[in-house]
Image: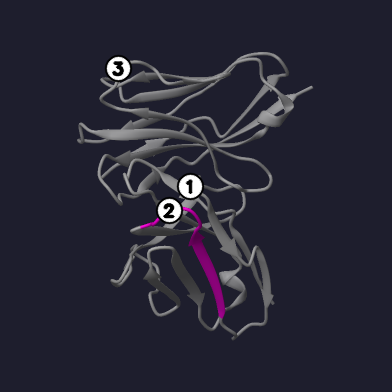
Amino acid sequence: GAVVSQHPSWVICKSGTSVKIECRSLDFQATTMFWYRQFPKQSLMLMATSNEGSKATYEQGVEKDKFLINHASLTLSTLTVTSAHPEDSSFYICSASGPIGDTQYFGPGTRLTVL
Amino acid sequence: AQTVTQSQPEMSVQEAETVTLSCTYDTSENNYYLFWYKQPPSRQMILVIRQEAYKQQNATENRFSVNFQKAAKSFSLKISDSQLGDTAMYFCAFMKRRTGNQFYFGTGTSLTVIP
């Protein structure tokens, strides 16, 4: 149990376009989901925390108009990178907090390449 | 604020030998969880082991065990009988014991198992 999926796993887009990444908890309800960004050989950097039905809380330095997060249901959160630029190229990982809140379950990540 | 420190950016170990990865943390909380995650080249975050701070007994999962020293705020991971598949980035993480709380990650240790 406790599986989190992400779609797509890899996306290439042109500069100036928007890209949506989906994060789904497949077999549990996730009241809280987290979005991370990871550069090569570095740790995970928390971008934002989203709770179902409310606005996401962004970490300092993360542009909320650039990285739109929607947590519309207890099993789905989406991250939309708007007007993507090459510097947005990165690996994006989502995680979901389980019902007991004693751990997080991670998705497999999405590799974004902006040309 | 919580901080997690991993002072060993890179480590290597001979196959079948034992290796210990270090992690220290700083917090004023009394109830929390500590985790070790493995991130292989696929970049999927895999939970290796979890420790609840109120439990004095060190957690163990097959070849993986921890040395949890609460007073010293130390949480090291011991890998016994190292296998080639253990080659990965290892992240230490801290989470307050409350639903929906975020992880605080260390900077990671890149472990290479040498055949």
Q: Which residue is mark 3?
A: B56
Q: Chain ID for label 3?
A: B
Q: Is residue A41 visible?
A: yes
Q: Is residue A91 visible?
A: no
B74 vs A10, nearest the viewer:
A10
Q: How many residues crowd around disc 2 within 10 Å: few (fewer than 14), some, or many (20 or more)?
A: some
- On whether residue B90 falls in the magenta region, the answer is no
Measure how far apart labels 2 and 1 are at the Cα level: 6 Å
Q: Are marks 2 and 1 in contact (CB under 8 Å)?
A: yes
SS under mark 2: loop
Q: How many residues crowd around disc 1 within 10 Å: few (fewer than 14), some, or many (20 or more)?
A: some
Three-letter amino acid code at disc 1? Ala
Please provide percent x and percent y for residue B61.
51, 22
Question: Where is the C terminus of chain A found, in terms of image quarters?
Answer: bottom right
Image height of A97 relative to A55, above or below: above
Query: Which colouring convention does the figure follow?
Result: one colour
Left or right: where A89 falls relative to A75: right
Three-letter amino acid code at disc 2? Phe
Q: Quadrant of residue A53?
A: bottom left
Three-letter amino acid code at disc 3? Gln
Picture residue at 30% right of the left edge, 17% below the top:
B56
Q: Which mark is residue A28?
A: 2
SS under mark 1: loop
Q: Are marks 1 and 3 in contact (CB under 8 Å)?
A: no
- On whether residue A27 falls in the magenta region, the answer is yes
Left or right: where B65 falls relative to A10: left
Q: Which residue is mark 1?
A: A2
Picture residue at 40% right of the left edge, 68% below the top:
A62
Picture residue at 46% right of the left edge, 54% below the top:
A95
The stretch of residues the image draws in magenta is A19-30
